[in-house]
Image (cartoon, helix red, strand yellow):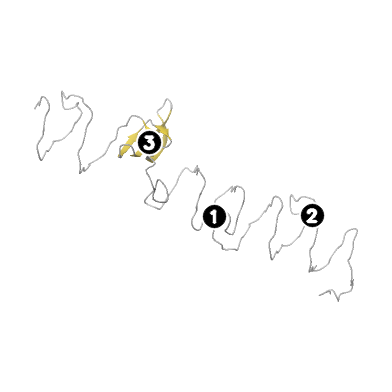
Amino acid sequence: DATSTTNGSLQTDGGLSVAKAAYIGSTLTSTGRIIVDDTTDATNTTDGSLQTDGGLSVAKAAYIGTTLTSAGRIIVDDTTDATSTTNGSLQTDGGLSVAKSVYIGENLTVMGLTTTVNSTTVTIDDPIFTLGGDTAPLSDDNKDRGIEFKWHNGTSAKVGFFGYDDSISSFTFIPVADNTNEVFSGSVGNVKFGQGTYTGRIIVDDTTDATSTTNGSLQTDGGLSVAKAAYIGTTLTS
């Protein structure tokens, strides 16, 4: 057996040229580079310019000039965290396509302009959503904050909005809304609540007169308790 350049059954102080096939029955050890000039692409494990029936161990960097296809798992033992697109144990200059599930063991940071989730069910443990950025704003951007939603009224598709209207500093619901640079406009919609407690005024802009208990701008199916003064601008019918 050969364990260096000075033993073994065949030795040469110069180079070794082999014009055709060479078969090595046991280990091939090289202290220099191994250069393969053949340019055959690999499409499976039995073609390509470099083939091995066993594993491939690389102690240092490996550079793949074109597509890398793996029929099995790719395991990266490096534990470097990623804080940008240029560090971390797995990096790509292009996109990443995954046909099946992805599990992220720690934080996921997305720096792009759009994040699209086509899942039919989304579950989030965090009880609070933060909208408007991950840092405190330095000035008023005059944009609204809330949820834009899509729906259909049976005739055509609509876009609705509910959230904080920056221009009037009020929580607003608009069932058919126009979105202009994250500023929503449109006629406000109907809401239905159970019991409510208000620490400020209740203002009703509707001017409908009341002629019975089922019309008028303010209606109640029960009694009406007023702790202080009440002013009736026109007829009071009892």
Q: Residue 224 carries which label?
A: none
**Tag 1's secondary structure?**
loop
Direction from residue 155 to residue 231 in the image, left or right: left
> What residue type is disc 2 on?
Ser
Q: Which mark is residue 161?
A: 3
Residue count near mark 3 (Cα–Cα under 10 Å), binned few <14, some 14–19, many ≥20: many
The N terminus lies in quadrant: bottom right
Q: Nearer the viewer, mark 3 or mark 2?
A: 3
Residue count near mark 2 (Cα–Cα under 10 Å), binned few <14, some 14–19, many ≥20: few
- Whole-percent x, y for residue 23 in the image: 85, 63
The C terminus lies in quadrant: top left
Mark 3 to mark 2: distance in Å? Answer: 60 Å
**Tag 2's secondary structure?**
loop
Direction from residue 126 to residue 61 in the image, left or right: right
> What residue type is disc 1 on?
Ser
Q: Name the residue under label 2.
A: 49
Q: Above or below — where is 131 with respect to 21?
A: above
Mark 2 to mark 1: distance in Å? Answer: 36 Å
Q: Which of marks 1 and 2 precedes in the sequence?
A: 2
Residue 24 picture quarter: bottom right
Q: Which mark is residue 84?
A: 1
> What residue type is disc 3 on?
Phe
- Whole-percent x, y for residue 72 in the image: 65, 56
Residue 184 picture quarter: top left
Direction from residue 97 to residue 37 in the image, left or right: right
170 or 152: nearer the viewer? 170
**Tag 3's secondary structure?**
strand
